[in-house]
Image (cartoon, rainbow, N blue to C red):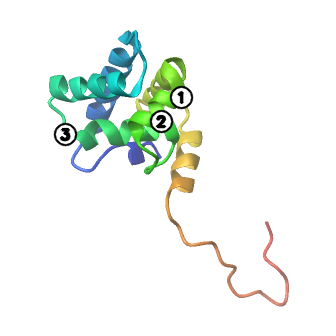
Amino acid sequence: HPRIAIPKKSTGETSLAALGAAANELQKLDVFDTPSIEECLNGVLEVGGWKKPFLFMPLRFALTSRRDSPDLIEVISILGKERSCQRIQSSMKTLSGHEPSSALWAASRSARSYPPQRWGPVDAGHPPQR
């Protein structure tokens, strides 16, 4: 569900604004290395007046479809400018409701730490139907 990309104490609108600002500023970078990306995102935080989770949580989910990932700056650097910006734009469309969220929902469910599914009691000796 797209809600997983929205930090607590935040809104979908804030996440959309943060993602949009990050995509716009990342797109402007001529040098796309970790120091440049870090400086860029720190600037986005400062201009937007957001705390780090308000930008980094939706950004991390947009780029990796996971709540947790390796260092976000490294992820962006490895993905590159084009792929990073494409993923951010795609996530923004999903978050704003312009595209089906089934892929984002499926990714969010797999990103969670759910206990493995266990079969309940077998009815009359027959295995559950799939």
Q: Which residue is mark 1?
A: 79
The disc labelled 3 sits on which kind of residue? Lys
Give the Cα separation between the discs numbered 3 and 1: 24 Å
Residue that lies at the very extreme toward the bottom in this rendered image: 124
Task: Classify residue 50 as left or right of residue 11.
Answer: left
Q: Amino acid at mark 1?
A: Leu
Classify mark 1: residues with Cα within 10 Å, few (<14), some (14-19) or many (20+).
Answer: some
Precedes in sequence: disc 3 or disc 2: 3
Q: Residue at x 77, y 87 (%)?
A: 123
In the image, residue 68 lies at what x, y percent?
44, 51
Whole-number angstrom distance, CA of label 3 to CA of label 2: 20 Å
Q: Are marks 3 and 1 in contact (CB under 8 Å)?
A: no
Contact? badges 3 and 2 (CB < 8 Å): no
Q: Is 89 situated left or right of 38 in this image?
A: right
Residue placed furthest toward the right: 126
| Mark 3 or mark 1: whose residue is earlier in sequence | 3
Q: CA distance from mark 1 to mark 2?
A: 6 Å
The residue identified by callout 2 is 75
Q: Is residue 86 visible?
A: no
In the structure shown, which secondary structural element does the residue marked by tag 1 occupy?
helix
Q: Is residue 118 depicted above or below 72 in this figure?
A: below
- Residue 86 lies, in percent from the top left, at 52, 21
Foreground label between 3 and 2 = 2
Residue 24: which quarter of the image? top left
Badge 2 crowding class, 10 Å Cα cut-off, few under 14, some 14 to 19, many 20 or more, is some
* Residue 20, visible in the rendered structure: yes
The quarter of the rendered structure image containing the C terminus is bottom right
Q: Name the residue tied to disc 3.
A: 51
